Amino acid sequence: MSRPGIAAVLSFFIPGLGQLYNGDIFRGLFWLIITPGFWLGTGGLLGWVCHFISAATAHSRAEEKQRAELASGFPHRVKVV
């Protein structure tokens, strides 16, 4: 099960990493490619914007996946105690 907080923190520090953690490969690659372009293209001005948007989208996507897993009653990962 994806944890929204972990996904958000991962994507804040390295945009796209939270999406990869969630299993969204293409979304993760998008942020990994786009963010450096914004950092370089705007002299750092819009780089932070990408960090925040990436973190927010990773968080919301993880919440969606978490709700879907709980609704189905069958988590993809089982905790071993």
Image (spheres, rainbow, N blue to C red):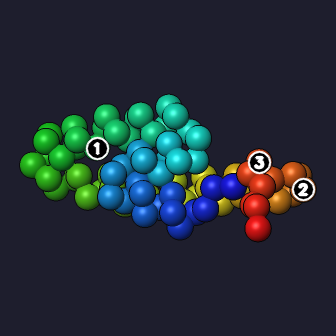
Please name whichever residue, 67 or 38, is drawn nearer the observer in this view of the structure: 67
Q: Residues within 10 Å of mark 2 (few under 14, many from 20)?
A: few
Side of 20 where 70 appears, left or right: right
Side of 57 where 77 appears, left or right: right
* Residue 29 picture location, percent across and down: 41, 34
Q: Residue under label 3, please give it.
A: 76
User: Where the N terminus falls, by quadrant?
Assistant: bottom right
Q: Residue furthest left?
A: 43
**N-terminal-most mark, 1 or 2:** 1
Side of 73 where 10 appears, left or right: left
Residue 33 falls in image quadrant: top left
Identity, as a three-letter code, of the amino acid under mark 2: Gly
Residue 16 falls in image quadrant: top left
Q: Work out whether 54 lies above or below 31.
A: below
Residue visible at 38% across and 41% down in the picture: 31
Q: Work out whether 63 lies above or below 27.
A: below
Q: Nearer the viewer, mark 2 or mark 3?
A: 3
Q: CA–CA distance between discs 2 and 3?
A: 10 Å
Q: State if disc 3 and disc 1 touch (CB < 8 Å).
A: no
Q: Residue under label 2, please give it.
A: 73
Q: CA–CA distance between discs 1 and 3?
A: 30 Å
Q: CA–CA distance between discs 1 and 2?
A: 36 Å
* Residue 54 picture location, percent across and down: 42, 52
Q: Is residue 54 visible?
A: no
Side of 8 where 69 appears, left or right: right
> On residue 49, which mark appears?
none
Residue visible at 14% across and 53% down in the picture: 44
Residue visible at 51% across and 63% down in the picture: 6
Q: Residues within 10 Å of mark 1 (few under 14, many from 20)?
A: many
**N-terminal-most mark, 1 or 3:** 1
Secondary structure type for disc 1: helix
